[in-house]
Amino acid sequence: MEVKMKFVSVHGIDLAYTRRGTGTPLVLIHGFPLDHTSWDKVASLLESEFEIITPDLRGFGQSTTLETPYTVSDMADDLAGLLDSLEIEKTVIAGHSMGGYVALAFAKKYPQRVSGLGLISSQAVADAPDRKEGRYKTAAEVAEKGTVVVADAMTPKLSADVKVQSIVRAVIEKQGKSGVIGALQAMAEREDSMSFLSLFTFPFLLVHGDSDLLIPIERAREIKAALPSAKLVELPGAGHTPMMEFPEATADGLRFFAG
Ligand code: MLT
């Protein structure tokens, strides 16, 4: 069943989100260049156990964006504003890939508001110089040719499952150029978070597919090695979109946070 989008105005952005279910608050943040719909299946599976909020990050889905550059930390501030408007003081925050970068930025800035942190197919390291350069190159191509550039490059790498590929391609093609360019720049400039991990005292979950072509599972294993108290769920056969490829297993992983 489709859940109605709601909107809140934060930092000059109209931020779209859905809210459903009852229980421990759980914010599920989408990756790049997707939107909140990537969490639909998992949210349906968990709505009797959690109060689930799925935002569209600025520039994606139905959220507006700014034409001036912004950071991953600004995206985290948007979520703090959303939580304020919903009167949610503390929450589990879990992000897919780029959504994980935003979740890490949120946990760094608002640790007192975090009751648990989940990284799904994400990483804590910053971009290597060549990756950073590649993002600016892609941003220039998107400015010239549109988001189809990213749809062509990323779709086969997001998942080997052709059904998932056709869904994500359609979602990517719908995204606006400004949001995609803004996020590429924000990701390129994000800080390394590995050195912050030991400061995190809340439950920490990692869910990662062993067939992820975009962020290798080694990145999750490195986090687990740096933070042995973290729980790592390795999903055999999953690519970069486990919440779409293996929603039940991903939802099961997130039950780690059930109160
Ligand atoms: C994502 O899925 O959000 C992106 O692949 C993350 C990235 O490009 O680093």
Image (cartoon, helix red, strand yellow):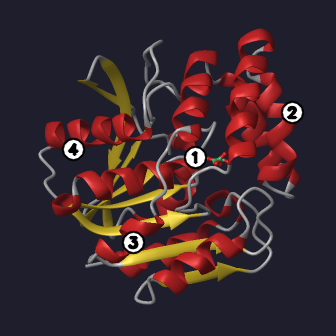
Residue at position x 88%, y 51% from top? 162
- The residue where tag 1 is placed is 31
Depicted 237 relative to depicted 71: above or below: below
Name which residue type carries label 3.
Leu
- The residue where tag 2 is placed is 152
Name which residue type carries label 1.
Gly
Would you call the spot at circle 3 few (<14 residues within 10 Å), some (14-19), or many (20 or more)?
some
In percent of width and height, residue 73 lies at 36, 41
Give the alpha-carbon distance from disc 4 to disc 2, as whole Å: 35 Å
Q: Is residue 165 left or right of residue 131?
A: right
Q: Is label 1 within 8 A of ligand 1 (CB to nearest ligand atom)? A: yes
Name which residue type carries label 2.
Asp
- The residue where tag 4 is placed is 83
Q: In the picture, residue 237 is in which quadrant?
A: bottom right
Residue at position x 73%, y 41% from top? 168
Q: Earlier in the sequence, mark 4 or mark 2?
A: 4
Would you call the spot at circle 1 few (<14 residues within 10 Å), some (14-19), or many (20 or more)?
many
